[in-house]
Amino acid sequence: MGAASAAATAPAAANETRGTLLAERLELATSLWARFMGLMGRRPLSRGQGLWLSGTNGIHMFFMRFPIDAVFLGRQTGDGTRPVLSVHRGLRAWVGMVPLVRGADGVLELPVGAIEASGTERGDVVRIG
């Protein structure tokens, strides 16, 4: 998975509000380098894959070779879930930045269609891990 030396693997990102999965195989980008690199220079995500960029409230699409869906999440709550603060479908490769999302503490980068398939909306809660 590209920056594998700088990332660990977690089992899933689940939308607990809807009882659906956003990603079955989620890579965790926890180091500064892994967050910086994100999905740049990599192959498109397969269905069921995703990347969790922790501690992030904004992303860009520069140097990306494929479109993605992005779900911005707030801080983890006492029950281990995170609120969905913003959803962005079909972000195009090479086309600018996503505006900063106030209160976001991370973003899920997913294959296009993952938001639609999971029914994820602002206000839902997601569990990572």
Image: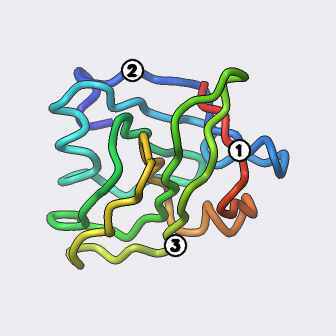
Query: Can you tell which mark lies on residue 125?
Result: 1
For marks 3 and 1, give the one nearer the viewer.
Answer: 1
Kind of residue indicated by mark 1: Val
Amino acid type at circle 3 is: Arg
First in residue order: circle 3 vs circle 1? 3
Instruction: Quarter of the image for the C terminus: give it.
Output: top right
- Tell me the element at label 1: strand
Q: CA distance from mark 1 to mark 2?
A: 22 Å
Residue at the spot x=33%, y=32% of the render? 29
| Horizontal side, residue 97 vs residue 48: left or right | left
What residue would you read off at disc 3?
A: 89
Q: Residue at x 35, y 36 (%)?
A: 55
- Residue 117: image x %, image y %? 72, 64
Q: Earlier in the sequence, mark 1 or mark 2?
A: 2
Secondary element at tag 3: strand
Tell which of 87 and 92 is nearer to you.
Answer: 87
| Mark 2 element type | strand
The one nearer the camera, 97 or 45, is 97
The one of 2 and 8 positioned closer to us in this rendering: 8
Q: Position of residue 88 (x, y in %)?
A: 49, 69
Q: CA distance from mark 2 to mark 3?
A: 25 Å
Write down the quadrant of residue 127 in the picture. top right
Give the image location of residue 15, x and y in percent: 73, 45
Which dot marks residue 61? none
Between tags 1 and 2, which lies in front? 1
Q: Quadrant of the N terminus?
A: top left
Q: Residue at x 42, y 40 (%)?
A: 105
Mark 2 = which residue? 8
